[in-house]
Amino acid sequence: MFHGTAATVVLLRDAPEGLQVLLLERPRNRGSFAGAWVFPGGVVDPGDYGQSADDDVELAAARQAGVRETAEETGLQLKVAELRRLSCWVPPPEAPRRYRTWFFLAPAPDGDILLSPDEHVDSVWLAPDEALERHQAGTMSLFPPTWVTLHGLLGAGTVEQALARASAAAPETYATRQLPGHVPPAMVWHGDAEYPDSADPAATFDEGTTPRDPSSRHRLIMDENRWSYERTC
């Protein structure tokens, strides 16, 4: 069962040293994702619906929510048309609260970051590889969707390159499963040889029925802070 829909916006900017993304630090002692560094975003509100002629009502509402949440959390004003669809994340069935979350890329407009103190306590612009290095060093806490998204941005040297790559690829759906008994812990997605055969009935996406190679991998291995993304499928 889903508790709702959410939106996440990966803000990008060009810096002299290359592509950077905006990350916000959640309060350490309260709320969801406590102490983690996240992208701007939040739950779709009723008022986000009905503001677009997009045939996909949920996706249109998620775009509106992404624009609204970005303004509330950072003070930066985006336009709906600037959001480039990247992926959709579906939590595992055992998660206590399940929000289907749409991830979007967007070029960051000029302006200072104005944090909402109830939501975040700090912000930083970082290259994707530097954020991953900080996570491995234990100085920055990331959740799997954030980590995998940053990993996917590796190799994009500019905002234009990152947006072009997203436009050229089909949006990915990550219907997450935890791999039982795996040490270290691992999360798997469609295409992995050990991904469950039955698709999550709450995930309204066709996961396909093509037989899988027993050696195929689509997973995140989480060995303490030393995480690795494996994909051969």
Image (cartoon, helix red, strand yellow):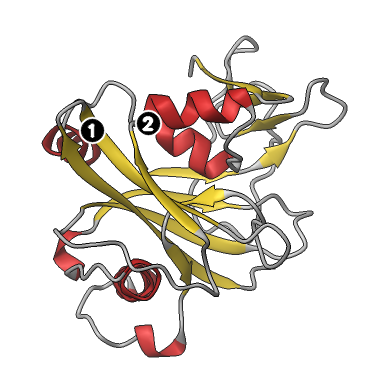
- Amino acid, disc 1: Leu
Task: Give the answer, above or below, for where 136 lies relative to 55.
Answer: above
Along the line of sight, the residue nearer the viewer: 199 or 107: 107
Residue to which mark 2 is pinned: 128
Q: Residues within 10 Å of mark 2 (few under 14, many from 20)?
A: many
Q: Would residue 185 be found to the left or right of residue 112 on screen?
A: right
Along the line of sight, the residue nearer the viewer: 21 or 228: 21
Along the line of sight, the residue nearer the viewer: 212 or 84: 84
Q: Residue at x 20, y 67 (%)?
A: 78
Is residue 31 something one can see in this rendering? yes
- Residue reaching furthest top? 215
Q: Which structural element holds mark 2?
A: helix
Q: Quadrant of residue 217?
A: top right
- Residue reaching furthest right? 181
Q: Position of residue 164 (x, y in %)?
A: 15, 36
Q: Residues at badges 1 and 2 in contact (C-beta under 8 Å)?
A: yes
Q: Mark number for residue 110? A: none
Q: Position of residue 185 (x, y in %)?
A: 77, 28
Q: Would residue 22 be found to the left or right of residue 201 on screen?
A: left
- Amino acid, disc 2: Pro
> Which quadrant of the rendered structure holds the N terminus?
bottom right
Q: Quadrant of residue 3?
A: bottom right
Is residue 208 something one can see in this rendering? no
Question: In 3D space, how far apart are the residues under numbered discs 1 and 2 (Cα atoms)?
Answer: 8 Å
Mark closer to the chain start, 1 or 2: 1
Task: Give the answer, above or below, for where 19 lies relative to 172.
Answer: above
Along the line of sight, the residue nearer the viewer: 68 or 163: 68
Q: Would residue 157 be found to the left or right of residue 66 on screen?
A: left
Q: Residue at x 42, y 53 (%)?
A: 123
Q: Position of residue 187 (x, y in %)?
A: 67, 33
Task: Give the answer, above or below, for where 163 lies relative to 5.
Answer: above
Residue to which mark 1 is pinned: 19
